[in-house]
Image (tube, helix red, strand yellow):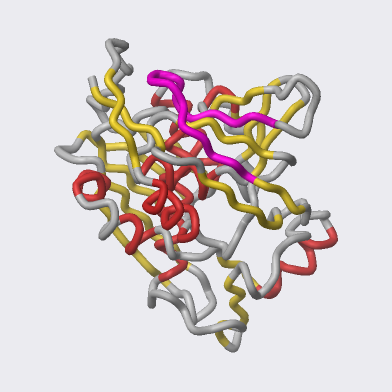
Amino acid sequence: MSQHTLAHEIVQTGVGLHSGATTQVRILPAEPGRGRYFVRVDLPNTPMIPAQVAAVNQAVLSTQLGKDEVSIRTVEHLLASLAAMGVDNARIEIDGCEVPLLDGSAQIWTESILQAGLVAQTTTDEVPVISITEPLWVRRDDMFVCAMPAQETRFTYGIDFDLSAIGNQWYSWSLTNALDKPDTCFAREIAPARTFGLLHQIEYLQKSGLIKGGSLENALVCGPEGWLNPPLRFANEPVRHKILDLVGDLSLLGKFPQAHFIAYKASHNLHIQLAQKILGFEIDDS
């Protein structure tokens, strides 16, 4: 069975969206079968946190992994890049509690992976393959995310905002095609889409101690009159970014199931609940 890791290490430094703290991430090759995992090199004994669904301890406005009292926040963009670009095994060393937001997208991560290159690994260990044999879903009011049996792994997302600059958007992207041509698919169609926020929510989030590292340099902001910091990289950049988040959250399954994932007005919390349901976890949807 063939797996892949990085041919060379990757180093990036930046500010965390919510913490506002500057951290450095160093991504190293890892042995076959190790999967993707974080190491807090700033803490005694360098605790390790696996990038797995079971390690999720918070999914509000970003996805956070934790083990005991140690956590890593806003992991979704980096993990989406590694998984979609075919990196099965990676040791991710970080010297703080939050992955840097960089430019608000996954473009810098994917460019770094392309520059580093991949190395094929042979292993006799079988990676569990998750089969989706019947529809699975979670919902809250008119928001939902589901997994449908399919002939390929595909992600489809819909969003709907009252702001006319965003409105109703849908986009669909195939991981199967991306793995055949990662440099022309994920890296070009999904990775460049930046995180976005609504102008009327910013003050509340800041007073709640969040988005301390957010700025017009690393996030799109939309108000009643339109975008505060155009131009957009895509006409439908917001919905493409939601696919980026969904890919990152579902990468915590280890390997993506062959399924069609469809989401509408969903959130990190609903993404993780679907991943938990796929694995047979008991879900607390209160």
Residue extending farthest to the front is 8
How many numbered dots are placed on residues in this image? Answer: 0
Q: Position of residue 214 (x, y in %)?
A: 70, 64
Instruction: Locate residue 257 relative to residue 205 in the image: left or right.
Output: left
User: Of helix, strand and loop, which mostly describes the magenta segment?
Assistant: strand
The residue stretch that appears in magenta: 25-40
Question: Can residue 141 be found in the magenta stretch?
Answer: no
Q: Position of residue 147 (x, y in %)?
A: 32, 37
Instruction: Locate residue 153 relative to residue 239 in the image: left or right.
Output: left
Residue extending farthest to the top is 124
Q: Residue at x 37, y 52 (%)?
A: 114
Q: Is residue 13 above or below residue 118?
A: below
Q: Hey, which quadrant is residue 220 in on the image?
A: bottom right
Q: Position of residue 77 (x, y in %)?
A: 51, 50
Residue extending farthest to the bottom is 225
Instruction: Locate residue 210 relative to residue 251 in the image: left or right.
Output: right
Q: Position of residue 275 (x, y in %)?
A: 44, 31
Q: Is residue 228 above or below residue 19?
A: below
Q: Residue at x 72, y 24 (%)?
A: 46
Quadrant the C terminus occupies: top right
Quadrant the N terminus occupies: top left
Q: Residue at x 18, y 37 (%)?
A: 150
Q: Hey, which quadrant is residue 256 in on the image?
A: top left
